[in-house]
Image: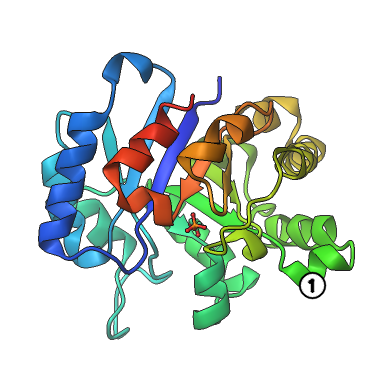
């Protein structure tokens, strides 16, 4: 059965001290008894991963990286490899975030390579995708999202999807305060699940968690998460405050 997941993407926020403090606060605030089928993930910046891993031990909190290089190692100044993440105790990586695509030129083809490298190193992937406002205005949101998934993931074998979480993040809803309506999220998630079913069969489609991301906050989480094909959220701004992040988790 697929799991509910709430993941906090901290982006380029929180220094070492703030990282330690936030992990500690989340640990304290989480209501363990309510979390049976829910995973909680936080994604600090690279330099603070080790500290976050250390401080989240013996808790429900898992630690993910926000990015990773596709090569095993070598002359790639400033980059971080899958093996480095593993050795830091990180078992999950976010790939394909719209900010990586927009500001760092990450393409579907590059992301396909990164996905392969992560999986080859036994690192779970939270794969992000989503249409821009112009796409939605032109009625092209399904074509765009369908293409992003197909181009980066559909070369994989079915069993690879045991290690993949999908995150639908419409670009127009990220950091804007504008959220997709629960119906818009459900429609897209159901479309994504249908694509998976067409390509890999119902078993795979039913077992992959599909998260929604884009201005999720305590006030709207419950309604979004109540939709049948929404298995949780990828949270930006609201994941930086323990109280808000935990309220979103408790929305399940
Ligand atoms: P916000 O929740 O700040 O809109 O960010 C969403 C996001 O980009 C998570 O990856």
Secondary-structure class at tag 1: helix
User: What crowding class fits label 1: few (fewer than 14 Cα within 10 Å), some (14-19), or many (20 or more)?
Assistant: few
Please identify the residue farthest to the front as the structure is shown.
219
Q: In this figure, which residue is indicated by the disc labeled 1? A: 134
Q: Residue 134 vs residue 4: left or right?
A: right
When the figure is inspected, residue 129 is found, relative to residue 181, above or below; the finding is below
Residue 54: image location, x then y, percent:
11, 45
When asked about the image quadrant of residue 191, the answer is top right
Residue 12: image location, x then y, percent:
32, 69
Identity of the residue drawn at 55% across and 42% down: 160
Q: Residue 4 vs residue 71: left or right?
A: right
Q: Nearer the viewer, residue 122 or 194?
A: 194
Quarter holding the N terminus?
Answer: top right
Q: Nearer the viewer, residue 101 or 150?
A: 101
When the figure is inspected, residue 240 is found, relative to residue 107, above or below; the finding is above
Residue 103: image location, x then y, percent:
51, 81
Q: Residue 116 vs residue 156: left or right?
A: left
When the figure is inspected, residue 223 is found, relative to residue 156, above or below; the finding is above
Identity of the residue drawn at 32% across and 53% down: 240
Residue 183: image location, x then y, percent:
76, 38
């Amino acid at each position: 059965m697929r799991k509910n997941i709430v993941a906090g993407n901290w982006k380029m926020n929180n220094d070492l001290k703030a990282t330690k403090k936030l992990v500690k606060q989340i640990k304290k605030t989480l209501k363990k008894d309510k979390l049976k089928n829910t995973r909680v993930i936080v994604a600090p910046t690279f330099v603070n991963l080790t500290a976050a891993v250390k401080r989240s031990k013996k808790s429900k909190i898992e630690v993910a990286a926000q990015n990773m290089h596709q090569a095993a190692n070598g002359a790639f100044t400033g980059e971080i490899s899958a093996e480095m993440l593993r050795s830091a105790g990180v078992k999950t990586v976010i790939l394909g975030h719209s900010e990586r695509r927009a500001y760092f030129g990450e393409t579907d083809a590059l992301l396909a390579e990164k996905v392969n490298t992560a999986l080859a190193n036994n690192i779970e992937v939270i794969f992000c995708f989503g249409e821009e406002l112009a796409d939605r205005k032109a009625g092209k949101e399904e074509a765009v999202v369908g293409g992003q998934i197909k181009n980066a993931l559909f070369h994989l074998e079915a069993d690879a999807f045991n290690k993949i979480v999908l995150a639908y993040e419409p670009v127009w809803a990220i950091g804007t305060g504008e959220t997709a309506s629960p119906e818009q999220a459900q429609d897209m998630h159901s479309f994504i699940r249908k694509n998976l079913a067409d390509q890999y069969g119902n078993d795979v489609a039913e077992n992959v968690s599909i998260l929604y991301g884009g201005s999720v906050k305590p006030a709207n989480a419950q309604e979004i998460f109540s939709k049948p094909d929404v298995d949780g959220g990828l949270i930006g701004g609201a994941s930086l405050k323990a109280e808000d992040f935990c309220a979103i988790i408790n929305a399940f």
